Image (cartoon, rainbow, N blue to C red):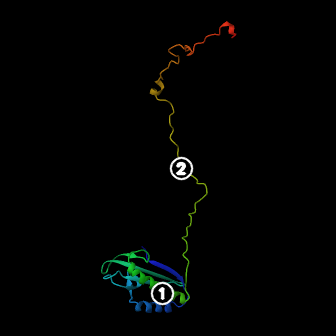
């Protein structure tokens, strides 16, 4: 799972917000430290539970809030990040979610507001629609010529001739019901 991340538009005093968040997180047992080349707030060392992390990053007019947990294989040996959704680490996620909500409320109180996630931009490649002119090498290409004449073996082959005459002359089959002409000249009477 990936870490929780939300971007807020923010034009107020970044120093005031950062000071308020730092004071709040220190009161909750977090320490500000460098971890994996990121400046974060960290709580826990992986002995009893995996450590939790909260990070705030500022740009000119935004603030990005991130939160995650690390799965500790051994104390100080972390193998993967765990986001705020899902069942893994549920006992620790509840308090971490509450802290994230409190920090979001601090951002809102200072005049920040959540930015809508922007859909991914896809720029279709531009293709040249002009006809392709052959290179000099392509223009000089001569396709191989094939000989369509039959080989000597094909020319000497004689197909067998079949006799289309019936072997037994045709005879009309006798009628199944014999015909008896009427008697007395055909008058029944």
137 up-or-down from 86: above or below: above
Mark earlier in primary sequence (2, 1): 1
Q: Quadrant of residue 37?
A: bottom left
Q: Secondary structure at mark 1?
A: helix
- For the residues labelled 2 and 1, the Cα–Cα distance comes to 70 Å
Q: Secondary structure at mark 2?
A: helix
Q: Residue at x 38, y 80 (%)?
A: 91
Q: Nearer the viewer, mark 2 or mark 1?
A: 1
Q: Residue at x 51, y 14 (%)?
A: 168
Q: Residue at x 48, y 84 (%)?
A: 101
> Where is mark 1, residue-wise?
102
**Residue 163 in picture, x, y percent from top left:** 51, 18
**Residue 161 in picture, x, y percent from top left:** 49, 20
- Decide which of 124, 83 is in the foreground and name it: 83
- Decide which of 157, 5 is in the foreground and name it: 5
4 up-or-down from 127: above or below: below
- Image quarter of the N terminus: bottom left
**Residue 131 in picture, x, y percent from top left:** 60, 54
Number of other residues with Cα within 10 Å of mark 1, as a class: few under 14, some 14 to 19, many 20 or more: some
> Where is mark 2, residue-wise?
138
């Amino acid at each position: 799972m990936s870490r929780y991340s939300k971007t807020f538009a923010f034009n107020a005093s970044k120093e005031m917000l950062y000071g308020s968040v730092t004071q709040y997180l220190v009161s909750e047992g977090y320490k500000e430290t460098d971890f994996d080349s990121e400046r974060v707030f960290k709580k826990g060392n992986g002995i009893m539970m995996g450590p939790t992390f909260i990070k705030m990053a500022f740009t000119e007019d935004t603030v990005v809030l991130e939160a995650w947990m690390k799965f500790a294989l051994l104390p100080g040996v972390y193998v993967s990040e765990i986001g705020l959704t899902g069942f893994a680490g549920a006992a620790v996620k509840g308090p971490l979610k509450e802290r994230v909500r409190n920090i979001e409320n601090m951002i809102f109180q200072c005049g920040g507001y959540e930015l809508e996630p922007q859909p991914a931009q896809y720029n279709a490649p531009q293709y040249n629609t002009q006809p392709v002119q052959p290179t000099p090498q392509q223009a000089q290409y001569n396709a191989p010529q094939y000989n369509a004449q039959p080989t000597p073996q094909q020319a000497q082959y004689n197909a067998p001739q079949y006799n289309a005459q019936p072997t037994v002359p045709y005879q009309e089959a006798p009628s199944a019901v014999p015909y008896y002409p009427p008697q007395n000249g055909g008058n029944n009477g």
